[in-house]
């Protein structure tokens, strides 16, 4: 059993069943389209998007997380196309998705750029990447996230990983998290929306 299988192997949803609040705010204003959720875990965000009418795709390396996500989708009478795969094995065709979502999808530096580059390639022209992640100041808090600074994201890091995206939003911000048992309290995040524009 992998790390996330072990963590997700309880009846409760570790991060709750409600979608991430930043994502909810963004999705409300977007035209419907094909959307990919990266390292989606137990499905709270992908199920929310499906309820809004998006064509939803997701993946994660945890079979336990996938099973819980599909159960949550069934409970909400929606369909999500959820693959079991590692982020290093992204092989979607180029120009596939209108939106790609990374909500607290943290990767170590030795693989992060490769994963982000693959995600950029499978984004449609005029498509958007939507991200919320913990920044290094999160190490001072106990509200969640990796305790390894190498896995935390800054504005500069995101700009360097997605140099061809037009920046629509890029900010570091202190927020209050209320997402299940594992994301609770004051937190330091970086938020990013980038648009792929190829003339």
Image (tube, rainbow, N blue to C red):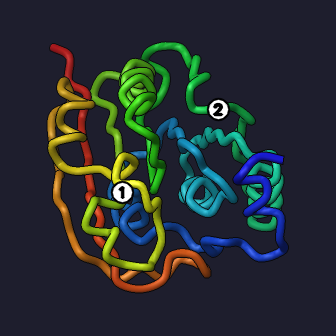
Counting residues from the start of the chain, the first of labels 1 and 2 encountered is 2
Q: Quadrant of the C terminus?
A: top left
Left or right: residue 161 versus residue 31 is left
**Residue with the mark numbered 1:** 132
Q: Position of residue 188 (x, y in %)?
A: 28, 70
Dot 2 lies on which element?
A: loop
Tell me: residue 160, above or below residue 27.
above
Number of residues whose C-alpha sits closer than 10 Å to that of mark 1, classed few (under 14), some (14–19) or many (20 or more)? many
Number of residues whose C-alpha sits closer than 10 Å to that of mark 2, classed few (under 14), some (14–19) or many (20 or more)? few
Q: Nearer the viewer, mark 1 or mark 2?
A: 2
Left or right: residue 77 versus residue 55 is right
Distance from disc 1 to disc 2, alpha carbons, whole Å, reads: 20 Å
Tell me: residue 97, above or below residue 142.
above
The quarter of the picture where residue 125 lies is: top left
Q: Residue at x 77, y 46 (%)?
A: 2
Q: Residue at x 45, y 48 (%)?
A: 106
Q: Position of residue 116 (x, y in %)?
A: 39, 30
Q: Residue at x 53, y 77 (%)?
A: 179
Left or right: residue 8 versus residue 138 is right
Residue 86 — which label?
2
Dot 1 lies on which element?
A: strand
The quarter of the picture where residue 21 lies is: bottom left
Q: Residue at x 48, y 49 (%)?
A: 105
Q: Position of residue 194 (x, y in %)?
A: 24, 40
């Amino acid at each position: 059993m992998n790390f996330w299988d072990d963590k997700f192997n309880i009846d409760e949803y570790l991060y709750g069943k409600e979608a991430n609040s930043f994502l909810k705010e963004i999705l409300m204003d977007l035209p419907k389209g094909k959307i990919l959720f990266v390292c989606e875990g137990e499905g709270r965000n992908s199920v929310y998007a499906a309820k809004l009418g998006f064509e939803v795709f997701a993946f994660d390396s945890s079979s336990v997380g996938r099973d819980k996500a599909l159960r949550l989708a069934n409970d909400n009478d929606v369909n999500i196309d959820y693959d079991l795969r590692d982020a290093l094995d992204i092989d979607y065709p180029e120009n596939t998705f209108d939106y790609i979502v990374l909500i607290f999808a943290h990767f170590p530096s030795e693989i992060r750029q490769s994963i982000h580059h693959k995600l950029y390639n499978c984004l449609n022209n005029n498509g958007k990447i939507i991200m919320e992640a913990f920044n290094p100041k999160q190490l001072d808090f106990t509200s969640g996230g990796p305790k390894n600074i190498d896995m935390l994201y800054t504005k500069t890091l995101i700009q360097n990983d997605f140099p061809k995206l037009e920046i629509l939003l890029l900010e570091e911000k202190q927020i209050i998290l209320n997402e299940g048992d594992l994301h609770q309290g004051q937190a330091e995040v970086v938020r990013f929306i980038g648009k792929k524009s190829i003339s």
